[in-house]
Amino acid sequence: MPSITSTTLLSALAGAVSVAAHGHVRNIVINGVSYQGYDPTSMPYMQNPPKVVGWTASNTDNGFVAPDAFGSGDIICHKSATNAGGHAVVAAGDKVFIQWDTWPESHHGPVIDYLANCGDAGCESVDKTTLEFFKIDEVGLVDGTSAPGVWGSDQLIANNNSWLVEIPSNIKPGFYVLRHEIIALHSAGQANGAQNYPQCFNLQVTGSGTATPAGVLGTKLYTATDPGILANIYTSPVTYKIPGPALIEGAASIKQSSSAITSSASAITGSASAPAAVATTTSNAAAATTTAAAGSSAVPTAASSSSAPAAVKTSASASAAPAASSTSTRPRPTGCASAKKRRHARDLAKH
């Protein structure tokens, strides 16, 4: 029987492995400017977390939303998600580079992107249950010759855990939530086995487009028995139908090649000459005026060498506060881990 010390060590190692087994979006990049996403594994424990463009979520274990929760608000932007305090500006037709911290090879599945119009009040205060999402990008089964196949998620991993999505050039200017999602299908052959990992980001889209595509409420995007949700990927040849509504007219599928990813994100490696700018709003988000906020700890740092990076905007009601270290004890996360890593943890616990 293992000692108390060994058991404690085993538990700690298992927790560390499980939190690394899945992932979350670390940041998004638009025209060389990096905007910080929400980190569910650290920001909930900060006394004053930074203001970011990613929606908050309570999945501190980097966990998922199961099919039995598709009718709840958790499927919209992840578990107990709340509005992001700021938004990034992007022109219709531009690309958004989405960088995950990690993604496990065993979690094969589609990568899907949606937009939802927030209205004139902006996305910082919109009721998520009213958002109607339309699909702008999807990559599912790439090669089903042999099980489990090659998937959109495999392309993401091959490109340094990153993804490119283009904002349709015909979209009407306004405030939108970008909903980015991976659906892991490694256990989807059984009821309630699919794992959805949705994440949301606030955008202000500029341009001269006029399209206002019809959308679907987040709680109506999928059902637990959709062919793309209840699916066995371990029979050859693999076949698959991506769930959710059809792509809108004007959606542009980007070839997720390493060259495209590298080209889009090349400015990330450049030296930052200025932090992103901040704007506050008075009556509503549409009337925002931009003011420089060099050195503000409440906004992400520009990763571009340009002297005039795009702006991150925040509502006047949200107070800027620097990031602080955790003041609470962090609970041990739970989740799935590879058998190999679990065996390694047990071996360490014996010593």
Image: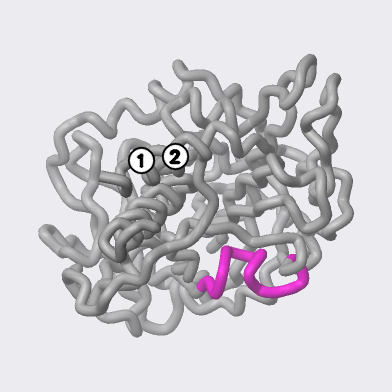
Quarter occupied by the C terminus: top left
What residue does disc 1 label? Answer: 347
The amino acid type, in three-letter code, at marker 2 is: Arg
Q: Which mark is residue 74?
A: none
Q: Which of the 4 image quarters holds residue 136?
A: top right
Residue at the extreme front of the image, as rendered: 1
Note whether residue 276 is visible.
yes
Note whether residue 202 is visible.
no
What residue does disc 2 label? Answer: 343
- In the depicted structure, whether residue 69 falls above or below residue 199: below
Residue 196, horizontal then vertical, whole percent: 65, 53
In the image, taking residue 110 as reference, residue 24 lies left or right, namely left
Residue at image point 72% right, 45% down: 187
Frontmost residue, 113 versus 251 = 113
Distance between the alpha carbons at the discs numbered 1 and 2: 6 Å
Residue at image point 31% right, 61% down: 3
Please tell me whether the stretch drawn in magenta is mainly helix, strand or loop: loop
Quarter occupied by the N terminus: bottom left
Residue 141, horizontal then vertical, whole percent: 74, 28
Are discs 1 and 2 less than 8 Å apart at CB?
Answer: yes
Within 10 angstroms of label 2, few (less than 14), some, or many (20 or more) residues? few
Residue 6, horizontal then vertical, whole percent: 30, 56
Within 10 angstroms of label 1, few (less than 14), some, or many (20 or more) residues? few
Residue 244, horizontal then vertical, whole percent: 80, 50
Q: Is residue 80 magenta?
A: yes
The stretch in magenta equals 70-81
Frontmost residue, 329 versus 183 = 329
